[in-house]
Amino acid sequence: MADNGRLVFPFTAIVDQERMKRALILNAINFRIGGVLIRGERGTAKSTAARALAALLPDIEVVADCAFGCDPDQPATWCTNCRERAAQGEALPHYTKKVPFVELPVGATEDRVVGTLDIERAIQKGERHFEPGVLAAANRGILYVDEVNLLDDHIVDVLLDAAAMGVNTVEREGISFQHPARFILVGTMNPEEGDLRPQLLDRFALCVDVQGVRDARARMAIMERNLAFEQDPAGFYEEWLPQEMALAQRIEDARCLLPDVRYTRNDMSTIAEMMAGLGVDGHRADLVILKTAVAHAAWEARTRLTDRDIMLAAELTLPHRLKRKPFDEVQTSIAALDKMVASARDKASDAEVEQEDVSMDGDAAGEDRQKKV
């Protein structure tokens, strides 16, 4: 699919790197997960995967003359301008556009990221004027930050705050402006060039460590596909179009199913037991695992969580949070995580935790609720 008029390498044509692709897909299903940090050497398809995901996602409906891409069907998330226009009885026109993919410019300042209020214009003319920044451009899309570990810590903080809150508020001299900032934050870094502070690492919801493919046949496939794309981008894309359409539809189906996915208090207890047993600092990891597990269940067209959902969610949530050496060798091991989940489940069951169904919005489900599959 096209990115700013240019065809991008198909997501489904990326060889291997399944964990990275799964982390991106789950964030696409549920924006509330909180983004992903991809750590690894150069040339491992990090930026390619992020661009390809944006091109793969379905078009979005936006308010036509809004600089922030407000969703016409979600007035609670509208920017200050759209709210005021609607309050005055104005009809807001809308149209369909591609999901934005925005790359943070190298050396971007805070004003460039969050946007600026024209104080002089406000004082002289009594008009509020807001100049949108990177967060506005990325709303409802993907914000890609290469070499995030080399950014100023304050800028990283601003990005993570916006990603967590889903809104950007700028206040200057008693004047304020607010607009939605709901995006998938994708940060990449090479650990050899320095690491992020632990406080910032923890705020990235998911983390994937990638490396070059070691299998010779897979490396040959990478060469063949890249050369074919360079020689005939349109033809190569057409060849992979059926797979791209199938994946796009599966993501859309999972998004629709997401509100119906139920989990039990026993599921929450299992996650809590697991995090307590691993000595994970804070409580962010518990919430991220739950949100990611729910998204994975929707991805597999299920409305109930299983231990596999929790295990795969933990695999993506823990790599940057486990610091103690006893777990260095097992933090990404499926077999080890499987045992941990099973042990935590046993402890939760022994505690006789209630089995009442709950959804991500916190609603409890009665015993007679019909489960959709």
Image (spheres, rainbow, N blue to C red):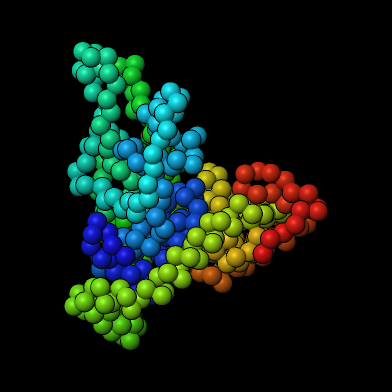
- Give residue 364's position: percent from left, percent from top: 72, 45
Please tell me which residue is depicted at 56% across the width and 56% down the height of the picture. 256
Viewer can see residue 320? no
Q: Percent x, y for residue 264?
A: 70, 53
Image quarter of the C terminus: bottom right
Depth order, front residue of 280/63 = 63
**Residue 213 position (above or below residue 251):** below
Quarter of the image that includes the N terminus: bottom left
Q: Nearer the viewer, residue 169 or 292?
A: 169
User: 96 or 172, which is in the foreground?
Assistant: 96
Q: Residue at x 30, y 73 (%)?
A: 237
Q: How many marks?
A: 0
Asked where in the image residue 179 lies, by quadrant, the reply is: top left
Residue 175 shows in the view: yes
362 vs 15, left or right, is: right
Question: Above or below — where is 15 with respect to 180?
Answer: below
Q: Name the residue: 28% across, 35% down.
A: 132
On the image, the x and y values in percent for residue 311 come to: 58, 64
Identify the residue shown where x is 45% and y is 68%.
247
**In the depicted structure, whether residue 301 falls above or below residue 228:** above
Residue 372 lies, in percent from the top left, at 68, 60
